[in-house]
Amino acid sequence: MKSEAEIRLAVELYADTARRVCFLHLKNHGDVEDVFQETFLKYALRDEPFASREHEKAWLIRVAVNNCKDAAKSFFRRRVSSLTELEAEPFFDLPVENRDVLDAVLALPEKYRDAVYLFYYEGYSAPEIAELLGRSENTVYTWLARAKARLRDALGGDFADE
């Protein structure tokens, strides 16, 4: 079990990333907070040391994604509608002109959303994303290319290649 100081440091370093990953999947503040807490509880209970800070961050992202998937397929979540609207969520405070981009990214299928978020926002390379998501490197490149094409169509060609 981790010490309180280790847990505080991890929350300080990775809380924003974990919440954003959860929000991409769940789009609901209450569910995000539940999964966020569950993710850091698993972190606190983990006895094995991490090889590096990057390994620790990757592990937390992977656990958050898995917890989101579990939450999304739970009986309760499938049977309940959220009262919280996307615009009321505090996680993506973007200027109005960037709101279209966020809406387009959130409209992507989950696999594309994850790849786009990890690549463009978190700065992971395709091989790193492949390892995080348990997919082949070529699959990640395909997802990124397809996501860019969909975003380009959704945004009327305003999405620039990088």
Image (tube, rainbow, N blue to C red):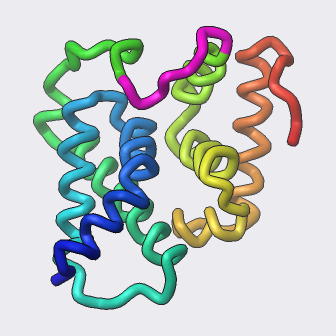
User: Residue 159 at what x, y percent from top left?
Assistant: 81, 25
Picture quarter containing residue 123?
A: bottom right
The residue segment tinted magenta is 90-97
Q: Is residue 159 left or right of residue 58?
A: right
Residue that sits furthest to the front in the current view = 5
Q: Quadrant of the N terminus?
A: bottom left
* Residue 30 picture location, percent across and down: 20, 32
* Residue at image coords 44%, 42%: 20
x and y percentages locating residue 72 in the rendered image:
28, 41
Residue 147: image location, x then y, percent: 70, 37
Q: Is residue 94 magenta?
A: yes
Q: Check the image and report above or below for 4 versus 111.
A: below
Q: Look at 18% across and 80% down and name the residue there.
A: 3
Q: 65 or 93: nearer the eye?
A: 93
Which residue shows up at 22% across the image and 37% down it? 31
Give the quarter of the image for residue 49.
Answer: bottom left
Report the predominant secondary structure element of the magenta stretch.
Answer: loop
Verify whether residue 160 appears in magenta: no
At a point 67% along the width and 51% down the height, the residue shown is 119
Rendered-image quadrant of the C terminus: top right
Please determine whether, in this image, residue 52 is positioned above or below residue 36: below
Query: Left of 74 or right of it: where is 131?
Result: right
